[in-house]
Amino acid sequence: MAVDAVTRVLAVNPGSSSLKVSVVDGGESIGQWTVQDWDGMPDPAAVEAVGPVDAIALRFVHGGDRRGPVLLDPFQENRLRALVPLAPIHQPRSLLLGRALRTWWPDTPLVACFDTSFHADLPPAASTYPIPMEWTRKYGVRRYGFHGLSCANALRTTAETLGRHPEDVAMICCHLGSGVSVTAIDGGHSIDTSMGFTPLDGVPMATRPGALDPGLVLHLAREMPMDVLDAGLNHHSGLAGMSGTTGDLREVLAARAQGCPDADLAARVYLHRLRREIAAVRTSLPRLDALVLTGGVAEHQPGLLDELAQGLEFLGVAPTVTPAREDLEMARQTEEILH
Ligand SMILES: Nc1ncnc2c1ncn2[C@@H]1O[C@H](COP(=O)(O)OP(=O)(O)O)[C@@H](O)[C@H]1O
Ligand SMILES: CC(=O)OP(=O)(O)O
Ligand SMILES: [Mg+2]
């Protein structure tokens, strides 16, 4: 489907704790809403009040091996459904939203934009898991990496700030939202990243544990039914599991301030593992021009960022904060594919 000129894009971003909706016109957002309920839907009347859009961009966390956005037709939808087990928190919701958006605006092109695409060129040493090659091939196992739309936008912003071409920036992007990831970027793309085959890997998150000893997972799988373990790792681990709160850092830090020892330990584990991951991906970069923090926690928890920075002085650059603007990246990709 080719469209004459795409200037106004409705960008729909279902995250694990919120739904962010934005109307982007000429590269700038002219209307933004956040729906906090997990199963919340955008309000079509509110979108229509901003005026007609030329296209709709929908974030899918998992795009498999897709290297860029695709027009979301029933064929693509079916293929993306096969990835539900690899991103069980996010993928079903994107599929549900896709259906709703097509019903509300059947004549508007709908484009799926993927978190994974930015990581498509991970070097084999970073993308390969050290398991039998037979399993790797048979089950299509690799490190995919996520939060790529956020990384792409952070790279663009950082390059502008440094006055360089994006391909000439060596940086670490830490996306600190409900999901958390750490990515090393060089030559304009991801060269190492903490999330893996699924968005459970890496650093502790609001409700996900991040990397675990595979022996621990095997042990737990023998102790409880698989669906209980699956729900426990996706919804009841991370900051929520350690602190006894919902995992929203506002709640964790409030409980910590009131002297809750579990909340204090949860915050310390979060920071420890985050620093450890940042140090690890630094080794993949030839040099470090910028350490960029983005996402809800980066934007709203300056005290925690000060704590994070203590112990990272050896990197030789001070962390900077960039708002997570996946909407702008999705609009950019949508304009590109529709031309
Ligand atoms: N206004 C705010 N004040 C303080 N913290 C916030 C605010 N908004 C978001 N956060 C923090 O950001 C996290 C959610 O980040 P966000 O990027 O919105 O997540 P997601 O996109 O994964 O739903 C929460 O843990 C919360 O603590
Ligand atoms: C990939 C991921 O975890 O996304 P989010 O932070 O939006 O939940
Ligand atoms: Mg998000």
Image: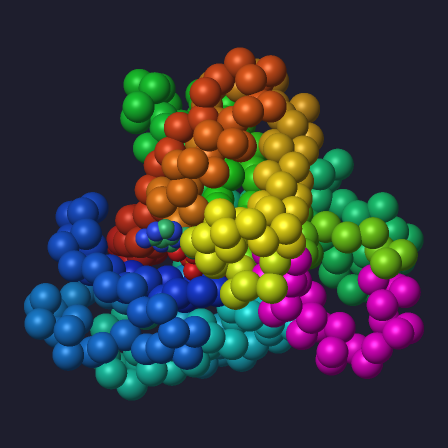
The stretch drawn in magenta includes residue 226: yes
Task: Indicate whether residue 45 is drawn in magenta.
Answer: no
Q: Nearer the viewer, residue 263 or 219?
A: 263
Q: Give coordinates of residue 320: x percent, y percent.
A: 40, 28
Q: Position of residue 266 (x, y in %)?
A: 62, 50
Give, as a single range, the part of the protein colored magenta. 217-242
Task: Please tell me in which quadrant of the rendered image residue 153 appears.
Answer: top left
Location of residue 19 with respect to 74 vertically, above or below? above
Q: Please state, as top left, top right, bottom left or bottom right, where the N terminus lies in the image.
A: bottom left
Q: Main secondary structure of the magenta part?
A: helix
Q: Nearer the viewer, residue 266 or 316?
A: 266
Looking at the image, residue 41 lies above or below residue 69: below
What residue is at 24 percent from the left and 83 percent from the top? 104
Q: How many marks?
A: 0
Q: Nearer the viewer, residue 237 or 182?
A: 237
Q: Position of residue 156 (x, y in %)?
A: 35, 34
In the picture, the quarter occupied by the C terminus is bottom left
- Residue at position x 88%, y 74% from top? 223
Left or right, residue 327 beside residue 243: left
Q: Residue at x 63, y 51 (%)?
A: 261
Q: Residue at x 20, y 78 (%)?
A: 44
Q: Residue furthest bottom?
A: 103
